[in-house]
Amino acid sequence: MVYLLKNNVLCLDSDMLLAYTALRSMYHNNNKIMYVSINQMCYELCGNINYTRAFKECVISGFDKLCAEEFIIIKDKISKTEFVLDLSGLYFEKEYFVEVDLEHIRKVCNCPCRVDKGSLLKYFLTMVGTFSHSIFAYKGIDERTGFVGFMPITYIAKQAEISEQTAISYNT
């Protein structure tokens, strides 16, 4: 499971969200100083090495912005794409967060459709953030689930900073 701070999902641009999601997935509370490479981040998001150069450029752009905003601090720069980072800025406790399985993130990042993967990920995480684990809906006579989304698509699209038409196309 990857735990993402809900406010960060909403306030970060799509490139920053890609980098943030990769780093949060690799982050461990007991190890705030970590070696990280851009390729490692791309691999974390995709689960393979078949990502495009454009995807990698988005991750680099997001990484640079996270550094500029001081979400992460570069302790040592090993090369243009390898760093020792202080990830303590990614730590959060008792906040509103989005819980998502890494497998789902990878499905989004490996989607064969020709769309901006960062934008698609932001839409997906925004939608998952509307799920309520305390509301149940029946899926049959006796089955029920605690994952009910209750926000209209116009709200989700606005939060994800995409048009309603784009949100509809992402749903198909």
Image (spheres, rainbow, N blue to C red):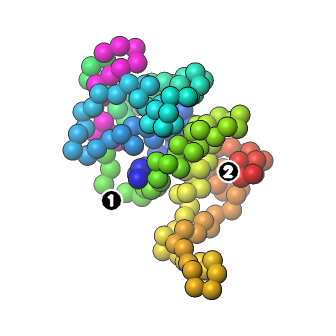
Residue 44 percent coordinates (x, y) = 44, 36
Pointer 1 local density, CA inside 10 Å: few below 14, some 14–19, many at least 20: few
Question: Which label was assigned to residue 119?
Answer: none
Q: Residue placed at 68% from the left, 43% from the top?
A: 162
Q: Which residue is mark 1?
A: 94
Residue found at the far right of this picture: 165
Q: Amino acid at mark 2?
A: Ala
Earlier residue among tags 2 and 1: 1
Element type at mark 1: loop
Pointer 2 local density, CA inside 10 Å: few below 14, some 14–19, many at least 20: many
What is the count of numbered marks?
2
Is residue 87 a member of the stretch shown in magenta?
Answer: yes
158 relative to 88, above or below: below
21 relative to 168, above or below: above
Q: Which residue is mark 2?
A: 157
Residue found at the far top of this picture: 79
Confirm or deny contact between disc 2 and disc 1 (CB under 8 A): no
Q: Residue placed at 59% from the left, 78% from the top?
A: 137
- Whether residue 164 is visible, yes or no, is no
Q: Residue placed at 48% from the left, 74% from the top?
A: 134
- In front of the other: 85 or 55: 55
Q: Which residues are magenta?
A: 78-90
Q: Left or right: 161 with respect to 136? A: right
- In front of the other: 156 or 22: 22
Q: Residue placed at 45% from the left, 56% from the top?
A: 99
